[in-house]
Image (spheres, helix red, strand yellow):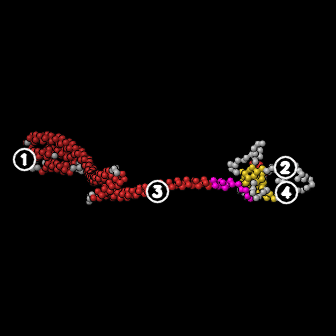
Amino acid sequence: MDEVSCISNSLDAKLGQFGRQSSKGREGIDENMMESSGMLNPHLDSSMQEPQQEEQEVGVKDGKDRTVGQSGMSLANSSTAEYMPEPLNALPCGTAAELGLDSKVREDLVLELQNALAEKLNQLSETETKLKDALDEVSMLGREMETSRKLLDESQMNCAHLENCLHEAREEAQSHRCAAERRASEYSALRASAVKMRSLFERLRNCVYAPGGMAGFADSLRALAQSLANSISDSEDDGSAEFRKCIRVLAEKVGFLSRHREELHEKYTNIEAVTEQLKKELEEKNELVKTLYTKHQLEKQASKEKISFSRLQVHEIAAFVLNSSGHYEAITRNCSNYYLSAESVALFTDHLPSQPSYIVGQIVHIERQTVKPPLSSSTRPDRGRADPAEQLTSNTMNSGSSLNPYGLPTGCEYFVVTVAMLPDTAIHSPPPS
């Protein structure tokens, strides 16, 4: 736009000089000026219209460029309008001769002006090209600036987000730092408490492993409880206080158990002595009981094995001997006619080769019977006249009869006794003849 201003200034200067030189012969050159102005106006109008269109295209993007273009166009129009020739009828008649004399000079001046105008038009084209390039560059820079502005907005948003994240991270780090400091303080307190508890447990271990047995353990534990009670401080934690309390209670219980153990030991010693005495007495009593029991068993066995010789009763022991008639008759003092039953005889004699001389057994049953008269006395031989051998044979044959199996007189009362074998009773058979 500076070049356009320079062109306008040079044109004004030359046209002013030309006006002063041709002030006397203005009427003669009206036609030439009309032609030159006709030549200049199209060129100037076309050259001014192109920047105006370009300025309208880029007017939305840059107001300053639009203002410069408008000022250049107005300058060119004013210059052109200033040097427009007046109508021929406006020139005075006296100046025609003067214009004819200076026609050659005017032609040279017009040619020079045309050359200068062509040169300036070329410069103006170059300037327009540069201006177009500058406008393109400005448009590109505007787009880049828009892109950069968007990037800047996005960067600002990212920066704001990062600031928020940084603030949150700072707050989180602060909270973590506070938590870490709190945990560190808690760890320090726990470590101090653990060290103190370890020392207390070490003292307790020394008490446990102290020599002297139960009494030494009770004394050392009591001394530890007394020492812990004397070392109470205001900065003591709950764990130490609870441990001290437990040690005190433990010392009391161990002391009580120790005293109770001594009492029990003394009682045990006394009870052991009494137990030994009672054991000896019990052994003596056992020996006495065994002796008395043996004596009682012997007496009982003797009473059981005592043979009854009076009136026989059930469960008594009776002895039967083989009489001359071949029957086993009980041995009694005042009672007679007690005979052993055939079943009992068979029980005692079945496993022997011969009849035993006597049988001893326990009475289980006594049957009382009476001798009945015979059915016919004529068929029987006289008892007194009969041969003893025949009489024994007859009694043996009639032993199974219920009338008179034992050869007793009629009406005589007798008893059939059933006995059982006694344990470990030896059955004696008669010696061989």
Q: Are marks 1 and 4 in contact (CB under 8 Å)?
A: no
Highlighted magenta segment, given as a residue range: 298-311
Of residue 92 and residue 68, the one placed in the foreground of this image is 68
Q: Are marks 2 and 3 in contact (CB under 8 Å)?
A: no
The span from disc 1 to disc 4 (Cα, nearest Å) is 226 Å
Disc 4 or 2, which lies upstream in sequence? 2
The span from disc 3 to disc 1 (Cα, nearest Å) is 171 Å
Residue found at x 71% / y 54%: 307
Q: Give the percent coordinates (x, y) of residue 421.
A: 72, 51
Residue found at x 45% / y 55%: 273
Q: Check disc 2 and give the amino acid type.
A: Leu
Q: In front: mark 3 or mark 1?
A: 3
**Total numbered labels:** 4
Name the residue carrying label 2: 392
Q: Are marks 3 and 1 in contact (CB under 8 Å)?
A: no
Q: In front: mark 2 or mark 3?
A: 2
Disc 3 or 4, which lies upstream in sequence? 3
